[in-house]
Image (tube, rainbow, N blue to C red):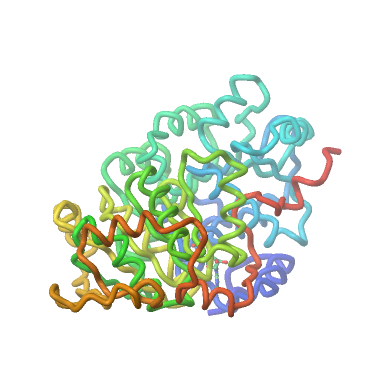
Amino acid sequence: MSFDLLGLSDELLKAVSEAGYETPTPIQKQAIPPVLMGQDVLGIAQTGTGKTASFVLPMLDVLAQGRSRARMPRSLILEPTRELAAQVAENFEKYGKYQNLTMALIIGGVSFSDQIKLLDKGVDVLIATPGRLLDQFERGNVMLTGVDIFVIDEADRMMDMGFIPDVERIGTLMAQRHQTLFFSATMPPAIKRLTDKFLNDPKVVEVARPAQTATNVKQYCMSVGPRDKREALRDILNDDPDATAIIFCNRKRDVSVLEGSLKKHGFSAGQLHGDMDQPARTAMLEKFRSGDVKILAASDVAARGLDVAAVSLVVNFDVPMHPDDYVHRIGRTGRAGRSGKAITFVSRSDEENWEDVIKLIKVDVEKMERSGAKPARAKKTDKTEKTADKPARRSRKSQDEKAEAVPAAPRKTGATKAASRRPARKEETVVGLGDHVPDFLKVPPR
Ligand code: AMP
């Protein structure tokens, strides 16, 4: 099936074809026609399925008719994080380049005064995170009674982040009649209650079973003691020097420690977690996207939904506490039809969480042996170990201590050698606002 049959305008079809898309993804096939017809939609889909375009494309056509009024956006898209909000804004820019729709963004890290000026003139699309939107509402800068299309994206993540009361309140600020598009990767009972409340006879589009993992991601688990995780990770990275990888930790503090450790071992590493301020987060995303940083240590919140097509490997340094997060984590690889690999470290303290993950995904995850593993009584070769690309294993304690004691100047490991051989890769779309500022933000309010 081609995009021509979905009922989209010629302008949009042109933008879609320039984006390089030939056929709609299953969620696009099923969601675009009902959205165009004004029906409510419940999309049960994870990121990586093309779900953003499944609402952005038809919205662009629906909004092409009609005019915006001061402070009364015609559509509202709620996103759980600023990174996702910025990603959706970029989708509007990409697909809407032949249409004249206006857009504002209410998220942390973007100057409110400029966005408020845009809102004052009237915008067609408002993209916001719930807390920031309510702030601006209280200040009288935005009214929601003119919203014709309300999109709630990544609802299960909103729930995890405690945003559901804010989302419910936002729902009450709208006029009775509007179209609602609701997306969630999973449907736990709290989300089901919300859909019963918000949606009116929706078209339910389910492209993968809730919490089903993508089939183009090869999953492995590895039994690793808690103190061996860093070395096991280095082995994996040295074995795959071309990898663009995200390493997920459960705690923010561990993200920082891991980043420091990787850097000390000469890897091109960076970190992303919720305690970093917005400029630091966007700058890091830029570096990761451009290939300047090859390995990103990250927490769940900061990296949720990130769309960096080049990510070839996800390592779960810890098994996530919520099994749904496993699905989201490994969905960072295998993007846009590419294949990807996900490796999960399972130490004794991870075992219970891992059982929950397996129950949820119902996949028989293949066991992987540590490639660097040597018999416990391996002969000592300390001198060569210091310069070898992949050091032989030492006793667990001394090895971990050494890892942290390596001087700050990076050694040339397999990873850095490979990185210096490779030209930095540039990706087309940019996550976050970093150096790249979406064009609509640069246009002064009329
Ligand atoms: P999403 O699920 O919205 O995060 O999209 C995942 C990725 O798929 C993004 O990189 C999109 O640019 C890409 N994508 C969306 N629709 C299509 C399509 N019809 N054909 C190929 N790639 C697509």
How far from the left and from the top, in percent, is residue 393? 25, 71
Taking the view exactly as shown, the residue that stands out farthest to the front is 383
When asked about the image quadrant of residue 15, the answer is bottom right
Does residue 139 sit above or below 51 in this rendering?
Answer: above
Outermost residue to the top = 139
Can you give x and y, in whole percent of width and height, for residue 34 in the image?
A: 51, 58
Question: Would residue 33 be seen by someone viewing this image from the given angle?
Answer: no
Looking at the image, how many numbered discs can be counted on the residues? 0
Picture quarter containing residue 149? Answer: top right
Give the residue at x 62% y 26%. 136
Q: Is 232 situated above or below 152? A: below
Left or right of 196 in this view: 2: right
Front-most of 116 and 77?
A: 116
Instruction: Tell me if residue 302 can be seen.
Output: yes
Residue 245 percent location from the top left of the image = 44, 66
As drawn, is 381 to the left or to the right of 64? Answer: left
**201 in relation to 292, above or below:** above
- Lateral position of residue 375 relative to residue 66, left or right: left
State the residue in front, 126 or 267.
Answer: 267
Ligand 1 shows up in which quadrant of the image? bottom right
Tell me what residue is drawn at x 15 percent, y 77 percent: 375
Residue drawn at (36%, 68%) of the image: 234
User: Compared with residue 121, is residue 2 higher up or lower down, i.e. above or below?
Assistant: below
Q: Residue at x 48, y 42 (%)?
A: 80
Q: Quadrant of the C terminus?
A: top right
Q: Residue 139: x percent and y percent?
A: 64, 19
